[in-house]
Image (cartoon, grey):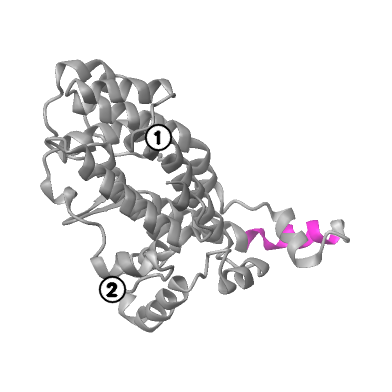
Amino acid sequence: MLRIARIRSPVLRNLEITYAYSLLAAEMDTPEANWCTFATWASRQAGRTIRGEDAIGFIQEWLGQERSLLHPLESLGRWLLRRGLFDPTSRLGRVMKRMHTPFDAVELASDAVARGNLKVFEEIAPVFAGEPPSAPLLVEAFAAYEQGRLLYANLCIGLHEQTRLQPEISEALDAPYVTAEELGEMLCGTSRPRLAKVVGTLAQPIQRPLAELARQAITHSLMILALPDRRLFLGAHLPDPAPIPGDAKEFVARFEPAGTDNCGARDWSSLDERMHYISHLFRAFAADTKLAGPPFTPEQVKSFQAGVIPEGEL
């Protein structure tokens, strides 16, 4: 665990975290999916945001039927992303960081997601590996695992995780909203604040739609979850979840809004909306055996453990 936490590259670290979750999930040997089972695929999805790949996916969907025109750009973009376009530890990433471009927001969101990915791993993975839990919700969760109360245990860890991630999620979603004055300072330098303010004001008609488009792309990336055989949009309802066991009913009810059973989240920055969706997710896919499959091929694992970002779908 400590070795993984010390990896400087957020891209390589995320791949190691994702793979570690899959190993921990298998070690738990629970009859249905445990928290690490779901964390494997959530971390894999976070990797796409950390590498910036979801931004290209959003542009493709935004262009609709014209996206075929973007194919050459997509290939170049994927090549740049895999070589660290938004990775501040890579040579390309350091160059990108010195430049101010419309991709600044994506870079900031990538950094926030990478920090959240590491924070959760450092707090929760060691407990699954055998260290005694200290956080109250983790203590409660592992007592529930020992009693065979799987859903309740998963929900306790889910609430701990989502509470701890709240700052990074808000930071990622707010990344595009750079003030007009800050934009002016970027263009004119802080030595001429009045001119910077004027330029920033003039740039607002351009900056606002760019910021909104960037926020849409970032929100899109945070509200997608790719599972082994399907891709979930977290704003859409998950039908037919498994029944709620008696011991978990009170917990689930805390996040069930009155008058609706639709679990689709409208605002992913809301902890209650995230937990409402997650409580449905844990029940809807608890018995899905495909989630226990490996997130990467053996060749990909060998590659990133050697410090090389693998080719292929990650």
Observer able to see residue 141: yes
Disc 1 target residue: 161
Q: Main secondary structure of the magenta part?
A: helix
Q: For label 2, count other residues whose C-alpha is less than 10 Å away and answer few (under 14), some (14-19) or many (20+).
A: few
Residue at image position (44%, 36%) is 123
Is 36 inside the magenta-drawn segment? no
Which quadrant of the structure image shows residue 39? top left
Q: Residue 199 colored magenta?
A: yes
| Picture quadrant where residue 276 is located | top left
Point 26% across, 49% down: residue: 22
Q: How many marks?
A: 2
Q: Residue at x 56, y 51 (%)?
A: 175
Q: Kindly identify which residue carries mark 2.
A: 65
Q: Quadrant of residue 263?
A: top left
Q: Residue at x 35, y 50 (%)?
A: 43
Q: The residue under label 2 is which amino acid type?
A: Gln
* 60 versus 192 height, above or below: below
For the question of whether residue 256 can be seen, the reply is no
**Does label 2 or label 1 sit earlier along the sequence?**
2
The residues colored magenta run: 195-205
